[in-house]
Amino acid sequence: MKTIKIKLIALLALIAFVSISCNNDDDDSSQTPKTIVSIAKGNPNLSYLVAALEKADLATTLNTSGSYTVFAPTNTAFSAFLTANGYANLNAVPVDALKEILLNHVLSTKVKSTEIATGYVKTLAKGSASSSNTISMYLEKGSGVDINGGKTNGGATVTTADIEASNGIIHVVDGVIGLPTIVNHAVANKNFTTLVAALTYNSSSGFAGILSGKTNSPFTVFAPTNTAFSSFLTETGYSGLAAIPANVLETTLKYHVVAGANVLSSSLTNGQVVSTFAGQNFTIGLTGGAKITDANNRISNIIATDVQCSNGVIHVIDKVLLPKF
């Protein structure tokens, strides 16, 4: 009899174990990641985003298979965006404009927060400056992740990272990320603080405003780094920006700009003569790497290319170009 009881207990234990295992399998199955849109629909703080995606006919795209990264603005972020731009509600935003703004929050690959590094990535948005080169996004990785310089510069900061979806990943952000202008991108990247200071030093010139707008756009800007400006001051003997005569500074800045053209690196040719906003030319060289020979026969290397903005494109150079005076 004792043997029969022991066998019965063992059988009941086995049945219980199998039952628990099946239940665990069911639980695992129920936790299968949902799509980006499904997750957003389940989050009351993202209801504006869902409504915007549906209005712009993008919900279907982010509800199907794929591998996306979505920087998802909260309802508070959307409310601030609508107020700042004078829209009564989402329905007042033109569909085409809304679609590009939303695409500016999407990357075509899945990028976890641990994989983010400071630098440029490409969104799916297309501004009016280029029909082929999509808008660039600047990510700065510190204790958190800032996008395009944060909210004060038309960008955002990640507040909740790494919400896994079956078709990618969501990072919740505290702002609607606008299509960045040349000045927005210059402000966002700390390697351009001296350039930004130069652009804004003489406010009466209005040059920073020009590069923030559409008049004479698109622009192609060859942007010197902070190191390039330091070398320029040493070379010319100026003690700082304040020591540079206003006309010299303005002409020098305009010498780095091509107006009326969004010139991508693929369009540069060896020996190409480029006419600048300053009314003077420089020459492109491609032998041994892309470079520029300025009016004083000085050579600057092009060290990064095709940072696409809403009103033009930026190429980064390692030496300030010097026009004739």
Image (spheres, rainbow, N blue to C red):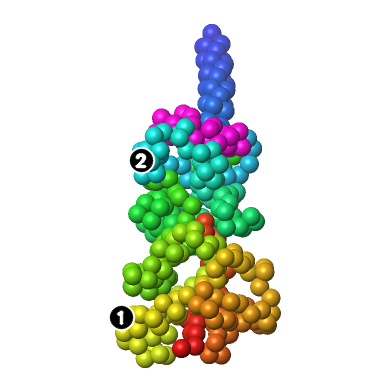
Q: Is residue 49 magenta?
A: yes
Residue at 56 percent of width and 53 percent of height:
127
Residue located beneath label 1 in the image: 242
Q: Amino acid at mark 1?
A: Ala
Q: Is 198 rendered above or below residue 262?
A: below
Q: Is residue 219 magenta?
A: no
Residue located beneath label 2 in the image: 83
Nearer the observer, 271 or 167: 271
Principal SS element in the magenta part? helix
User: Does residue 250 appear to the left or right of 24 in the view shown?
Assistant: left
Nearer the observer, 324 or 222: 324
Crowding at dot 1, Cα within 10 Å, few <14 / some 14-19 / many 20+, comes out as few
3D distance between C-alphas at marks 2 and 1? 38 Å
**Res. 305 in view:** yes
Q: Amino acid at mark 2?
A: Thr
Q: Is 110 rendered above or below residue 315?
A: above
In the rendering, at what x and y percent does residue 83 appear? 36, 40
Residue at 59 percent of width and 64 percent of height:
262
Which quadrant holds the N terminus? Answer: top right
For the magenta stretch, what is the residue range?
Answer: 40-63
